Image: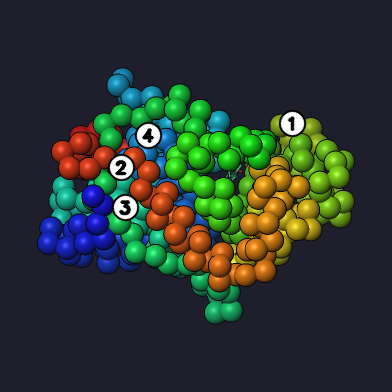
Amino acid sequence: QLSSTFYGDTCPNALGTIRTSIRSAIARERRMAASLIRLHFHDCFVQGCDASILLDNSPSITSEKFVTQNNNSVRGFEVIDEAKSAVENVCPGVVSCADILAVAARDASEYVSQCRYSPRGPSWTVKLGRKDSTTASASLASRDLPRFADGLQRLIDLFESKGLSERDMVALSGSHTIGQAQCVTFRDRIYSNGSDIDAGFASTRRRNCPATFPNGNGNLAPLDLVTPNSFDNNYFRNLLQKKGLLQSDQVLFSGGSTDSIVKDYSRNPSTFRSDFASAMIKMGDIEPLTGSAGIIRRICSRVN
Ligand code: HEM
Ligand SMILES: [Ca+2]
Ligand SMILES: [Ca+2]
């Protein structure tokens, strides 16, 4: 029931307004492109793409923002709030926060890099018409969002439970071709002395990520060591060299069923780009509230 022309009559300038707002946020801080893509993902995996992730704690809401996978980690809330208020100025009460998240993720991918020589990310036509939830669920967030220490089968099962295939999962994980992770998420891996990590890479990463918890927990490293600001297929090339930053990255290429997909994407950037776009559309279709289900929040962080 979602449709790319949903606001064609009721708010013809919605998409342009969102785009302007997202573009200026990414111009201010380039990492924001990565953060916005991730925010849409963490919304869709919990109760579907219903903007549940944006709700703050209140007597009737247990916010998703503070579960382990989100706390001090997901970012971009202010940027979505800005886009929302820009849209409210042109069409009050019409455009959902859930749709703004979906459009922001697409716009972010499109504008990933401001460098002339870096490939921009893929683009796709966003389907619209999602409504916003009146609830959030910390317990579902905790259950349904993947964790950096998850093994391959666990990741496959989680994505499958959302209707996404192994191929979708590998393509979507390719978002880790941009963005940053905190030391606390990759410490175990770089100090593991295991055989599934390149020794030189591990030693480089140890320099800015002290061995002892919680020292340096928040120190950042790029998820893609080669081209952290370009939306290319280098992420997959890193995995072939055992230079995935997170354990959940490296398990995609560690002798299991997804190895062949990683190899395919490492050789064929255009296959990766088009599969990524299709998988983002599929992810945006997860359990939307439509029609009379759900509401249009006026302020994304609370139920009207
Ligand atoms: C397959 C399971 C996945 C796991 C376990 C995972 C885990 C993580 C972790 C631990 C971080 C670093 C967070 C931090 O240190 O604060 C991260 C960052 C990121 N993730 Fe994932 N992720 C997964 C899949 C995805 C998917 C499907 C997408 C998007 C469609 C995505 C997009 C991103 C982006 C763009 C960043 C960088 C964010 C930034 O710099 O603000 N991830 N992920
Ligand atoms: Ca949600
Ligand atoms: Ca890259």
Give the labeled residue for mark 4: 47
- Between the residue at mark 2 and the residue at mark 1, the CA separation in whole angstroms equals 39 Å
The alpha-carbon separation of the residues under discs 1 and 4 comes to 33 Å
Question: Residue 96, position in %: x, y?
Answer: 25, 47
* Nearer-the-camera pick, 222 or 277: 277
- Residue annotated with mark 3: 100
Three-letter residue code for mark 3:
Ile
User: In the figure, is residue 262 to the left or right of 211?
Assistant: left
Disc 2 element = loop
Q: CA distance from mark 4 to mark 2?
A: 8 Å
Which x, y percent locates residue 253? 72, 51
Task: Tell me the quarter of the picture where residue 4 sits.
Answer: bottom left
Q: Earlier in the sequence, mark 3 or mark 1?
A: 3
Q: Please state the total of marks drawn on the protein image.
A: 4
Disc nearer the start of the sequence (2/1): 1
Residue 229 sits in quarter: bottom right
The three-letter code of the residue at mark 2 reads Pro
Circle 2: is it few (<14), some (14-19), or many (20+) Cα within 10 Å?
A: many
Q: Earlier in the sequence, mark 1 or mark 4?
A: 4
